[in-house]
Amino acid sequence: MDETAPQKGTVTQRAIEQIKAMIGEGRLEPGQRLPTERDLATRLGISRSSMREAIRALTVLGVLEARHGSGIYVTQLEAGDLLETFGVVADLSRGPRLVELLEVRRILESTATALAAARITVEQLADVEKHLEAMNATDDPEEILFHDLAFHRAIVAAAGNETMAAIVEGLSSRTFRARVWRGYQEEGAFERTRREHARIHRALVDHDPEAARAAAAAHVGEVEAWLRSQMEVRNEVQRSGTWGAASSDRVEHSAW
Amino acid sequence: MDETAPQKGTVTQRAIEQIKAMIGEGRLEPGQRLPTERDLATRLGISRSSMREAIRALTVLGVLEARHGSGIYVTQLEAGDLLETFGVVADLSRGPRLVELLEVRRILESTATALAAARITVEQLADVEKHLEAMNATDDPEEILFHDLAFHRAIVAAAGNETMAAIVEGLSSRTFRARVWRGYQEEGAFERTRREHARIHRALVDHDPEAARAAAAAHVGEVEAWLRSQMEVRNEVQRSGTWGAASSDRVEHSAW
DNA sequence: ATGGTGGATGTGGTCGGACCACTATGGCGG
DNA sequence: CCGCCATAGTGGTCCGACCACATCCACCAT
């Protein structure tokens, strides 16, 4: 009775763990190319189908990258690669958890802004100012949102912690920002946002970490407080819609 | 010229987005059961293979849960479910990124500990003390590590922000802690750790947020500083090992 | 009637093979 | 010498079959 097959969990799950372990142990390095799906399947003693599921899983996790016609490669395993999935959390969260997410963002971004105030270079500051001005120079909500995101991203990047930047990035994912900001901005908060951004910018110019921390915390806190107040109002939920039925097929089940 | 097939990216990727969107729009609620893989494949106009890859991807992301013989279900979509993948980042990170991760943890955990100091109940405090005492009552490193983790987990939980707790949990994942703590503890840091934990506990009892923040920050900061110093020493890397070759096949490539 | 039990059914899990779409390589012809 | 294109190799997709497990219900013994 040999121990060739530990037999725990699905074969796919096992394959995922094996690849992960191999990377963790350094037997697979960033950027390196893996054997073909067919080879991998043979080596791990599973079918190509199962192997593909494992690869797909590691792909969405940002660990592997499959290039059609070329091969499978290990990503650079940088913070951005691995934390890309963080955005999913923001996208799928609703209700109280949105407030929690903003709270986390307030904590991280205020600290990051403080760090940035201490370390930011003239080049980085120029980049921040570019977006600040662009944001104040237009009335198009889409463009404002874009530069708003870029403004904060540039600041957090100046803090020098890529991991933190990647997390904050996820917390400010496009759809998340759009969902929350939309309502917030519609209440004529443009002017207030402008003032808050100005305060943050001032703190950066003055290289004043504490002022920067306070300004950033207040900035996010404003939205957080607004969202909190909204939570008590929203009790009506829309739960309509059926499956897309791309070909206009008939729907058999009520919900499906 | 019908627009039935937008044709962007792989069909699997499209399926993933569709399911995610359906959940995001509330057409799929937590705990709800999905149609069978075969049905889903038909409805989305793809093969079961591709559908399975999409499901597998959403499974590892903590969005779906497949129960053999029963069906596919949407998870509760709680912070813990979705942030489970966060541990992967900690597991696969090395070098400078480990320091960055600890820095993030220091920021979040110090704030969480401060919040806990203000809000913690007697029951929660009792739970914290239980692990504190258990940790001081043994010499088994494994057991100490376990209660160490539980100690901090209980504190962060008392802060009342599940999302934050889940993130910190990921940053303190078993393998991560084991990797970093091992070396740290071997330097006879037990006594120091004990004192720091005592200070954190005192601050909680006193309901003193600022003291709690400082104590927690110092605690993590200690490890952070130690790790930072280690970074400059480690320059030798082990890069040996080939593929397991379960059937003792010959190895053709050098690394593979 | 009751309560266990075993088979039928439905579901996810795995496998193997086939073919398509794309890349990359190298030889051929200009 | 350069550029084009046939070709081999790789990931992407699909199909059909079978297995392992969960669930449910009719059937049987009590």
Image: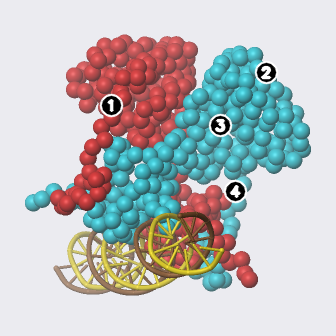
Chain colours: A red, B cyan, C brown, D yellow
Going by the numbered disc 2, the residue's amino acid type is Arg
The chain to which mark 3 is attached is B
Is there one chain holding both mark 4 and mark 2? yes
| Callout in the foreground (2, 1) | 1
> In the rendered structure, are the residues bearing label 4 and label 3 in contact, judged by CB atoms less than 8 Å apart?
no
Give whichever of discs 3 and 2 has the lower sequence position.
3
Give whichever of discs 4 and 2 has the lower sequence position.
2
Residue in the image at 49% along x and 60% along y: B66
> In the rendered structure, are the residues bearing label 1 and label 3 in contact, judged by CB atoms less than 8 Å apart?
no
Going by the numbered disc 3, the residue's amino acid type is Leu
Question: In the figure, A229 relative to B141: above or below?
Answer: above
The CA span between labels 4 and 3 is 22 Å
Residue in the image at 35% along x and 13% along y: A192
Q: Tell whether B165 sits left or right of C8.
A: right
Residue designated by label 2: B202
Q: Residues within 10 Å of mark 4 (few under 14, many from 20)?
A: few
- The residue closer to the viewer here, D2 or A47, is A47
Q: The residue tagged with tag 2: helix, strand or loop?
A: helix
Going by the numbered disc 1, the residue's amino acid type is Glu
The label number, if any, that marks residue A236 in the structure image: 1
Q: Position of residue A227 (x, y in %)?
A: 40, 23
The chain to which mark 4 is attached is B
Residue designated by label 3: B102
The CA span between labels 1 and 3 is 41 Å
Residue designated by label 4: B237
Q: Tell whether B43 sits left or right of A99.
A: left
Q: Residues within 10 Å of mark 2 (few under 14, many from 20)?
A: some
Going by the numbered disc 4, the residue's amino acid type is Val
Q: Quadrant of the N terminus of chain B?
A: bottom left
The CA span between labels 4 and 2 is 42 Å
> In the rendered structure, are the residues bearing label 2 and label 1 in contact, judged by CB atoms less than 8 Å apart?
no
Residue in the image at 40% along x and 23% along y: A232
